[in-house]
Image (cartoon, helix red, strand yellow):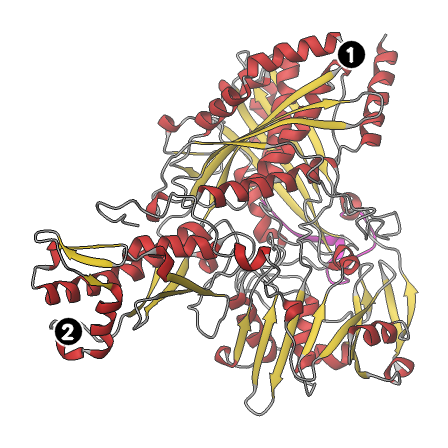
Amino acid sequence: MARNVGDAAYAGTRTLRVEDLRLLTGAGTYVDDVVRPGMLHACFVRSPMARARILGIDVSEASQLDGVHAVFVAQDLNPGVREQWYTLNGRDDPDTPRPPLAEGEVRFVGDPVAMVVAADRYIAEDAAELVVVDYDPLPPVVDYATALDSTESVHADRRGNLVGQLGGRPMADLEPVFENAPHVVSQTVYQQSHGPVPMETRGIVAEWAAAGGEMTIWAATQSPHEVRSFCSRLLGIAEHRVRVVMRDTGGGFGQKVLPQREDMCVMLAATKLPAALKWIEDRQEHLLAAGQARQEHGEARMAFDDDGRILAATLDHVQDAGAYPTPSPVQSGVAVGMLFPGPYRIPEGTFSSRFVFSNTSGRVAYRGPWQYESMARETLLDTAARQLKLDPVELRRRNMLSRDELPTANFNGMPYDHISPRETFEQALKMLDYEAFRREQERAREQGRYLGVGTCTYVEPTAGATPFHATEGATIRIEPSGKVNVYVAGGSCGNSLETTVVQLTADALGAAIEDVSTVQGDTAVTPYGAGTGGSRSGPMTAGAIARTAGELRERILAIAAHKLEVPAEEVEFIRGRATSKRSGGAGLTLAEIADIAYYQVHALPPGVPAGLEASGRYHTPHLMIWANATHVCTCEVDVVTGEVTLLRYIVSEDCGPMINPSVVEGQIFGGTVQGIGGALYEHLAYDEDGNPVSTTFMDYLLPTATEVPVIEVGHVETPSPGPGGYKGVGEGGAIGSAPAVVNAVADALAPFGVRISRLPLTPSSIVGLLEEARARQAVTR
């Protein structure tokens, strides 16, 4: 995006967020705030068993309850499904069966079996308890790690429970390197199931107008245009007959990009009802059935020479897909192996990934769905440093790429450019004063206190050129008053896209920022877009706005030049005012220029059309725009109670030029806290029968301000080849934080010989690890 000559751009400044006034004063509009005439409410009857045949469903008593409008079971809704593929995957991508309501068999605790529709949610919940389902229990497949060898199948037509697999070159090709290497280190880490847990749970309101065959949907979504496309396919109606509106969405983090089965049920049922239908998920339902993430493990191996330089690396990765993953885990999971080399010089390597069905809640996307690559690589590097008797920082310095070595490609062929891993690494260590911390650590150990430091350096793909994400559109309309409205798919998901769009548009046009507003999240008026996901909003929206605003700016300059009677190249247009560079003096405001464009058509210069409105679409030519960062965490571990106290947390981020530093840092803060939760607290746990045991916030622990230290942020700026040099920044915080915390804990416990293999690192698990380490030491003595 071109900056206005002679004027300080709005981009790069800490402009106050335009969302804040309504959100902080409680004036936001969430799905549950939507009220329609005669609106009905839905509640789901959910399976109490992980796996069972459905022998019968008796809805008679529930249907007779006063206020109940309908009770739907599979035979009522499922036959109405036309197509249900996601644009992200494509029509022909092999996918998991996705029945709206369970049919024939339930496959996890929380599987929706029936849907009650009533005058209000309270009646619907009462009626749901009156639905009688006759179940014939079947042996569940709960542990994904053994599911491939199980004689039981989650889906009868998927024997062996394999969803799919992919990989690089055969691992056998690398065996000579490992056999001849002076040092070989391997490590397996099991990362537990946890989820995005947004502030707002899932929700949808669907209103069917039978006369016109039109559907209006209000949704808690990250991608309103995808909801529209999905609904049109599901119901078999034209896309233009579906309108999707999203207002405020209290966090999505990937979970709300694509419609899930409950959304399908509401869409289908709405066509059978005389009024709008609302479903709002409660928190227990959310933890039960909204989807899991991060449930995976892998054996990572690296071969080193005597100087600690990496010769080869492999990753054998297995991921839990649950019963009904959204979307295909094979397609989204490929990034784990492709990114496993990270920002290091590794001449040879490969990976294998397998994705496995289990009788648990289906896998969903979660902020950096490929995050396991960093967990596996970075924890292995710390383990290798201890075995090679090197400082983990020194081992990384011997192997980490720096900016002047680019462009290059990792051993999977992923091309790296415009990143600065070594530079962020050194900046973060300097912010900590690493050497001073190591001295403090030694003094603390002499006093019986155990401090640790951990790092994680990673590369992050943003604004990828996959078909669904490769384009983004914008429409800019300058009203006759001179006020500017910019329309993008976008939406308010907590990522400050409204503020970002206003700043970018003001700069690209040369308008005063107070005159710019944005309309987002309404498919009836905004151009098609993929929404927020894949850390794409910043660079893609910048491209769309630059392309669209450029056309309008040319018209503005032409009209002003004609009126001022000077050549267009001599017109300066800054903060909504056009003046002559040569003569100065009186000029034209944007309102006066708009008045000419709309009402004085006879005064327009030749060739300039009436009005001031344009639409444009940006198509990225880049396979990927890369961001990168280094996280550094220090902690203290109480070796008696197992409590972990985080002391300092530092992030050095390279996301290119920052459109709004406050927004960038807010994204880093939020993602970092989620990663801390994944390392230490959060766990969607199941017992051996597949019963979830963490369905309230009493059991599912989240980090709070008490547990999280002040997050210190440093910036390295390497412009991308994309519009404005911008990069995405949405997912990085959640990628780097958990490995850094795990490494810090492992470093603190290194004197005891502790080996970390499972997360989360709760106090009880740390006490158990210490006991195991002491037992091993006793055996060797």
* Circles 2 and 1 in contact, beta carbons < 8 Å: no
Q: Which residues are magenta?
A: 148-166
Identify the residue at horizontal 37%, vertical 47% (top origin): 11
- What is the count of numbered marks? 2
Determine whether 568 is above or below 38 in the image.
above
- Secondary structure at badge 2 equals loop
Tell me the tag on residue 604: 2
Residue in the foreground of this view, choosing between 729 and 612: 612
Quadrant for the C terminus in the image: top right
Identify the residue at horizontal 75%, vertical 71% (top origin): 101
Q: Quadrant of residue 155?
A: bottom right
Q: Closer to the N terminus: mark 2 or mark 1? A: 1
161 inside magenta stretch:
yes
Residue in the foreground of this view, choosing between 360 and 613: 613
> Which residue in the structure is indicated by mark 1?
448
Other-residue count near label 1 (Cα within 10 Å), few / some / many at <14 / 14–19 / ≥20: few
